Amino acid sequence: MTKKKQAATQDQRISCRQWLEVLDELNIGAMTVNRRHRILAINHCAQALLGMRLNEVVQRDCREVFTGVPCMVACVVESGGQNEYGDATVHFFDEEECEYTVTRIATPIFDDNNQVAGCLTILQDHSPISDLIDRLRYEERSLKNILDSLDVAVFTINRGGLLTFFNTAAEKISGYGRDEVLGQPCTAIFESDASQDVCLLHDAVANGRSRSVHLGRLIGKFGDSVPIRANYMALRNEKGTIVGGLATFQDMTLVQQLNQAIRKRYTFHDMIGKSPLMQRLFDMIPMVADSRATVLIEGPTGTGKDLLAKILHSTSARKDKPWVKINCAAMPENLLESELFGYAKGAFTGAERDKPGRFQEADGGTIFLDEIGDLPLSLQAKLLRVLEDKEFYPLGSRKIQKVDVRIISATNRDLGHLVGTGRFREDLFYRLNVVRMELPPLTERRDDLPLLIRHVLRKLSAVRALPPPLISEMAMHVLLNYPYPGNVREMENILEHALILCCNGPIEDHHLPDYLHQPLHRDRLDKASAERAANAQQEREAIVAALDKHKGNRARTARTLGIDRTTLWRKMKRLGLAGMVKDPKASTSREGKGKSKARRS
C-alpha cells in the first residue's frame, strides 16, 4: 500500500472514529464494517446494546454478530452503494431473556475513488431512532402529532414513492396498520399502478404543483375498494427542495350512498364478493340485465336478493322507468289482489274511486315480487296471465288493462318442492324460472367474510359520519368463525351492535354480542341445523317423487323440477340419490329400438 493510500485510509478511520464518538455522545450505537463484512470499530453504546465487548466484536463477520437476521433490508456493501441506506428491525434478548427491539440503519462509506469501502451501521432502541428517522426525512414530531390527531386521512411519500407517514385516520379508512404500509410503494394502496391517484401524486412531487381528484379509489386491507376524495401536494425541506409528497383524503362512502339513494340506482359493485360463486353471479348480471327475460332469484333469508333485483333493474334499459317492489308474504290474501292489480269503483264496500295497482304503477319498468313462494294459489293464475299476455282485469272491472313490465321474483323457499306438493302452479313456475339466479349463504362463501366485514363497517360508519374503526385480532377471529345463519343481514346487526359499544375506538371481542362467544353457538347452530335438515328432507322428497314419475330419467326429472341436469345431479349426490338415476341416452336408445321393432312388425 502506498503512503498516499495509507494516509487516505488513516484519514477515513479517523473520520469514522469521530463519527462513532459523536454518536456515542448522543446515546446512539454505531459500528463500521469493511467490504469483507468485518467489523472494524464499534462504539460503547453499540457494545451495550449488543451485550458484547470490543474484543468480542472487532474483526468478526457482521453476519455472525446478527446471527439469524438478514444483514440489512438491502446490503449497501454488496449493492456497491446503489442502495443509499438499508434499515431493519432486530429483536434481541438480554441476560434476563427479556426481548427488546433495536432499529438498525446502514449507509455506505466511500473511498477517494468513490468506491464503496464499507458501511456505517447505526443501532438504537426503537423509540429514539424513530425521532432520528423523522428528522432525516424532514418531518418534525410536533407536526406528525398534529397530523395524527386529524379526522382527515394523511400520508406522505419520499421522492421514490415509498410511504413514510400514515396517520390514524388513514389506518381506519384503509384498514391497514401503519407498520404494514410504511416503506411500501404508494401504489400498494391504490387500485392499479396506472390509476389517476398515483399519476397525480407523482406529478405533484415532480412539478411541485398541488393536484386534486374528486373521486378516486383506494384499496382496503382485505381488497375492498374505498371511494375517496384526495388532494396531493409536494413536501419540501427547509431549503425549499422537494423531498416527497403529502396526500390528504376523505372517505366518500356516505356521499356515494346518498347519490345512489337520490338516483335510486345501483351497480353490481354494491354486491361484495370474490368467491367463485359470486364471481360467476357478477359475470351473469350484465347479460341478464340487458335481456327482457323474467328472472327468479333464489337464496336463504338475508343473502341480498332485494339488492340483486335492484341492480338488475338499474343496469337494464328500464333503469329510467318505475321500480316497484311488493312483498307477497306481507299482506293478507284479500288485500293482495287489489294491491297487485288495483280495483274499480264500487268493487267492494268502501271502493269509492278507481285505484291503480302495482302492476299499473310499474308500467314500462320493473316489478319485484319478493317471497313469491307465499303467493296464494288463487292469484297465481292471474299472475300467469300477466306473464303470458301482459294484461289483466282490475278487481271488479270489466275493462282490460295492458302493461309492459319486467317481472323479477325472489324466494327463500324451494319452488320445485312446492310444485311437487301442489302448493305452487307448475306452469307459473316455468314462466317465472326463465333465468334463475341463486345467491349462496355465507357458509358457502367464507373467503368473502373479511371483505364483507370491512364493507359493512364502512357503510355503517358513513351513516354516523365517522371513519370505520379498527378491529382487534381476537374480534376478527370471532367474526370469521361465526356461521351467520342470518347471512349478511345478521352480520350487519352484529357489526352495528359492536359500533355502538366500541365508542369510536377499536372493536374488541367484548363489543360483539354475547351469543357469539357461546361454545360453538350451540343454540343457534342447532336451530340452523334443524332447518337445513328439514329443507334437505323436503328437497329429497320432491326429487324422489319426480324420479319415480319419470322412472329415473334425469333429463325429464330436471325439466319437471325446473333446474338443469348438472344441478340435479349435484343435489342427488349430496342427498344420496345417485343410485336412482337412469341414463337418458340408454333410455333414448331403448325407445328407439322399440319404435324400430314396431315398424318392422
Image (cartoon, grey):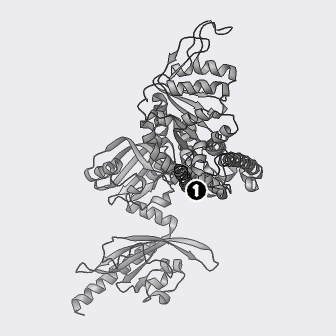
Tell me if residue 524 comes above or below residue 428 in the rendering: below
Location of residue 503 in the rendering, given as x and y in whole percent from the top left corner: 63, 43
Residue shown at 30% from the left, 86% from the top: 10
Residue 133 seen from this side: yes
Location of residue 255 in the rendering, given as x and y in whole percent from the top left corner: 46, 35
Location of residue 498 in the rendering, given as x and y in whole percent from the top left corner: 65, 45
Residue shown at 55% from the left, 30% from the top: 368
Location of residue 439 in the rendering, given as x and y in whole percent from the top left corner: 57, 45
Residue nearest the observer in this picture, 342 or 13: 342
Query: Residue pushed farthest bottom?
Result: 1
Residue shown at 60% from the left, 44% from the top: 504
The residue singled out by tag 1 in the image is 583
Q: Quadrant of the N terminus?
A: bottom left
Tell me if residue 136 comes above or below residue 301 in the rendering: below
- Name the image quarter holding residue 347: top right
Tell me if residue 34 comes above or below residue 192 in the rendering: below
